[in-house]
Amino acid sequence: MVTLNRIYTRTGDKGTTALANGERRSKADLRIETYGTVDETNACIGLARLHAEPRLDAMLAAIQNDLFDLGADLATPPSETPPAYEPLRIVPQQVKRLEFDIDTLNADLAPLKSFVLPGGSPASAALHLARTVCRRAERLAVQLTMVEGEIISAESLQYLNRLSDFLFVASRTANANGADDVLWVPGKNR
């Protein structure tokens, strides 16, 4: 468990931060950018929860906790020297729970006949924002896998991919199960 007695440490004043293993990296480092964007996704979900109905709110609460797990996973890159503790990692069951929740919500939705524009209800708009930030986190995570020496688990990438799908389905659920979706009309304003 984490204990925070002091919020400021001054250790980041020169533009660096520490990974969970103590390694110092630039705050502009791609790994830091990746888990920082996961944190942004979490904040967006927190805003969406202010408008969510109870069933959806419970799903989002579980996701917020998972996103802290994911941040811890990304902040603890695998190394040749194992840490003195068992690092927290995203596990397949977390991905499966997202898939179950997607299927549960999607069962009540009418099939789409057009792309959906972000908007509708306040909850839906906030979930669309969370979805786009999550997609950015996923793009950064994929980019990180292309850096020599950087490793991200397959489960972490799967989780981000499923999460953006969940957030899309959840946004439709928050729009009266899709009845209040704002649909894209191609070329409407030409």
Image (cartoon, grey):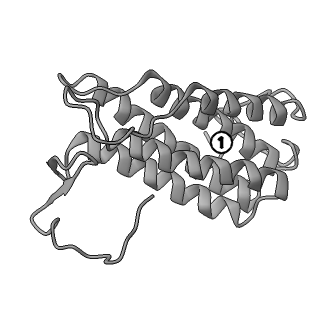
Residue 8 visible in the snapshot: yes
**Of 87 and 93, the residue lying toward us:** 87
Residue furthest to the left: 14
Look at the picture and state if 70 lies above or below 65: above
Q: Position of residue 25 (x, y in %)?
A: 15, 48
What amino acid is at disc 1? Leu
Residue occupying image coordinates x 38% and y 39%: 87
Quadrant of image for the C terminus: top right
Element on which disc 1 rests: helix
Look at the picture and state if 22 lies above or below 47: above
**Of 100 and 20, the residue lying toward us:** 20
Residue occupying image coordinates x 63% and y 43%: 189
Q: Position of residue 109 (x, y in %)?
A: 87, 34
Residue occupying image coordinates x 35% and y 28%: 152
Quadrant of image for the N terminus: bottom left
Residue linked to disc 1: 167
